Amino acid sequence: MRQLAARGTHDWAVIASILDAGFMASIAFARKGQPFVLPMLYGRDGRTLFLHGAASARIMGELRDAIPICVSVTLVDGLVLARSAFNHSLNYRSVVAFGRARPVEEPRAKLRALRILSDHLLAGRWEDVRGPTRTELAQTAVLQMEIEEASAKVRTGPPVDDDADLGRAVWAGVLPLSMSAAAPVADPLLDPAIGAPAYLGCPGEFAAVRASAGEAAS
C-alpha cells in the first residue's frame, strides 16, 4: 500500500465489488521453503472465500493444514498509452487478501460452499444441474479462507505525462478492455429441443447476471 498509496484502499465495499467481478484468483503460499502460486476458481460469502479442487491433488492436501495464504484478484480495464514509454500503465482493479485455508468437511457445509462457487460463476446454474453424488463430493476438496486482512488498488483515467512530453506528436489515451460473453455455443450432443436458459442472457446482459450474483453474495 505504500507504493502509489493514493490508489489503495481498505474500503470493504470496494474490495467486495472487485472480488465479485472476478473469476480466477492467484493463490500464493510457501511450503518447506518452496513458493507456489496457483490459479483457482473462487466464490465469496461475506468475508469468507471458498476454493475447491480434486481431493487427490497434492496441493489441496498442502493447503488443508491451515497455512497462511495470499489471494490476489486483478481485473484489467484498459491500456493506458502515454507519450513516453516510462509513463505507460494499465487501468485496473486489484485485491490482495490474507488468511488461512481450512478444509470444509461437513457434507451440508461443503454443498453450500460448492453452490456459492457455482453461483459466483453463473447465478442460477446450480438449480438446473444434477448435484454431486456422495462419491463426487468425497472426491472434491473444499477450502475456506476467512479474510483477515485485505486491500484494493484501483487506477482509472488518462495517462499522466511529463509536461515536456505533452507536445509530442504521438497519440495518447486509453484503450478500454473488458470481459464479455459471446453467444452461447450448444454441446453437439444436446437435444435441439432444449433452449438456452434465461440466465445465460445475451452478451449484453451477461454483466447484469454477474452483478446480481455479486449482490446476492454480499
Image (cartoon, rainbow, N blue to C red):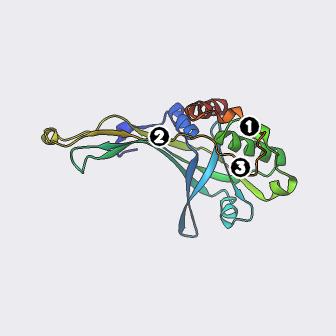
Q: CA distance from mark 3 to mark 1?
A: 11 Å
Q: CA distance from mark 2 to mark 1?
A: 27 Å
Residue 91: which quarter of the image?
Answer: top left
Camera-nearest label, 3 or 2: 3
Pick out the residue farthest to the front: 192
Q: Is residue 80 left or right of residue 32?
A: left
The local secondary structure at tag 1 comes to loop
- Give the image location of residue 28, x and y in percent: 54, 57
In the image shown, does 203 or 32 lie closer to the viewer? 203
Q: Residues at badges 3 and 2 in contact (C-beta under 8 Å)? A: no
The local secondary structure at tag 2 comes to loop
In the image shown, does 90 or 106 lie closer to the viewer? 90
Quadrant showing the N terminus: top left
| Neighbours of disc 1 within 10 Å: few (<14), some (14-19), many (20+) | few
Task: Residue at 54% x, 34% y: name it.
Answer: 17
Q: Amino acid at mark 2?
A: Ser
* Residue that mark 1 sits on: 195
Task: Residue at 66% x, 36% y: name it.
Answer: 200
* Residue that mark 2 sits on: 178
In the image shown, does 163 or 144 lie closer to the viewer? 163
The local secondary structure at tag 3 comes to loop
Residue 138: which quarter of the image?
Answer: bottom right
Give me the disc on residue 69: none
- Give the image location of residue 202, x and y in percent: 60, 33
Pick out the residue farthest to the right: 134
Above-or-below relation of 127 to 28: above
Q: Amino acid at mark 1?
A: Gly
Q: Is residue 104 left or right of residue 66?
A: right
Give me the disc on residue 187: 3
Q: CA distance from mark 3 to mark 2?
A: 26 Å
